[in-house]
Amino acid sequence: MPTILEPPRDLLNRLESILTPQYVSADIFERIKNTIDSIPYDIEKEQLALAVALPNSAREISEILKLANEETVPVFIRGSGTQLAGSTRPHVPGIMINTHRLTKFEIFEEDGFFECEPGCICGDVQTELERRGYFLPMAPGSRPIASMGGLVSNNTSGHLIDACLGKPGDYVMGLEVVLPNGEIIETGTKGLRRPAGTDLTKFFVGGDGLLGVVTKIRMRLIPDFRKAFGLVVYDKLTSLARGVQRMYYEKRPIPLYMEFMDRDTSRLAYQIKGMTPPDGAIIFFVSIGTSEKEAAEKLSEVFKSFKAENPLEVEIVEDREVWEKISSAREFIGSYIQQEMKSTVISAEVVSSLRGLVECMEDSMNFNKGLPALGELSLFLLGHIGALTMHPAMPLPKEWDNTKKRQAVKEKFQKEAELNIKYGTCGGEWGQFSKRKDFFIRRYGPSAYEMIVALKRAVDPNNILNPGVLEGYR
């Protein structure tokens, strides 16, 4: 069996000279904690970080990257480790930079933007913005722990519907970035008009952490909305999908959120929250407006499309406490399934075209059928249906060994790729590389992949920063 690689003492000494010994750790438990991620099988000993560094400034990250280039030591960047496509797990030993000390956050209301460092937690930023009357265009299910740096690097809007507000990158005005060679650059603008033409911001927002380390994020302030809440219950998921299609085809005002859970998932979620479960699958949404009246009117318009598909129930949810129970049940359903099934849950990200939504729903309902490992499991179906995204979720028995868990994860990404290729789509939440590298090549072609490789090589000739993400190491 391979032994755990110990970090060279001279490397630790040089890191400590940059950060002080207090913020450099070679402790085996810290190294393990900063290496594991959501992938359910165990890490390999040879994957463990050599050392964990906790810098407090762009300058300190710059010095670490310069050192890494001198010594040809890989550097990995970690926020909260909530990414679901394998990008946060290192593939070779190296220095793990944890961004948790980079938490400066300031709102510049007179300029119309806020700035935050990458270690700021999404939920904390959201809470403070809402207190001031603003809205954060990010809503991942992991927002109580997810870091802003990771979210921007993925350009993920989470549960929000892209067709309503767009992506977070549409609101990022500029960044401070440390390049892989240690140089620090600024991108974008402090004006409310975004740059036309070449804007380096676009290389790093949604850049999968390949081209630089984001150390400061500047985002436009968005005034908060008035909201109206509703839900619809259907006997069949295909009827639910047709309601979504109708909403788009009939040009209804697109809600901010539109989530769904199948019958079994809804029953479990409601029971955990102490509510009476619905009789079928549910779809629930938040409509927005500049006034409560406008939000309610938009909700009424949306209901028209869904009523045409013969639902079991249509309800305006006026009690905010009830709504919070429903929405939080959906947000934390993964944990609830794990708790109920005493297992680890893995889920896929299947994105449909609008035309193919009903067929894609049926494909998602049968996601694991006929697969050697996943076919043994039960399936819960949920997702961000307003963004045409479905998450087939499957609980893995804890007693499965690493080999079988690896097989299950491989099957999940392969089936996910087949469906996203079938519908001409791609993942909208979890990034495009690491375990999705093969999909990227199938979806966009070898030339597209080689363009990314060439860009990475140009800014990181020693392949120091996050090696393995682009290569798709397993």
Image (tube, grey):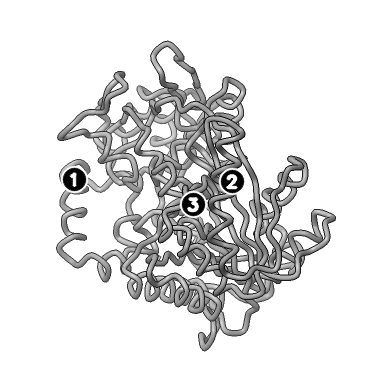
Which of labels 2 and 3 is toward the front?
A: 2
Is tag 1's residue or tag 2's residue first in the polypeptide sequence? Answer: 2
Q: Is residue 56 above or below residue 370?
A: above
x, y percentage for residue 288? 54, 39
Q: CA distance from mark 1 to mark 2?
A: 47 Å
Which of labels 1 and 2 is toward the front?
A: 2
Left or right: residue 61 compared with residue 385:
left
Q: Residues within 10 Å of mark 1 (few under 14, many from 20)?
A: some
Give 377 or 352, whichever is nearer the viewer: 352
Identity, as a three-letter code, of the amino acid under mark 3: Gln
Q: Secondary structure at mark 2?
A: strand
Q: Secondary structure at mark 1?
A: loop
Q: Residues within 10 Å of mark 2 (few under 14, many from 20)?
A: many
Q: Are marks 3 and 1 in contact (CB under 8 Å)?
A: no
Left or right: residue 256 compared with residue 200:
right
Is tag 3's residue or tag 1's residue first in the polypeptide sequence? Answer: 3
> Mark 3 — residue?
83
Tell me the number on the disc at residue 461. 1
Is tag 2's residue or tag 3's residue first in the polypeptide sequence? Answer: 3
> Mark 2 — residue?
286
Q: CA distance from mark 3 to mark 1?
A: 26 Å
Identity, as a three-letter code, of the amino acid under mark 1: Pro
Q: Is residue 369 above or below residue 234?
A: below
x, y percentage for residue 130? 59, 27
Tell me the number on the disc at residue 362. none
The quarter of the picture where the C terminus appears is bottom left
Q: Secondary structure at mark 3?
A: loop
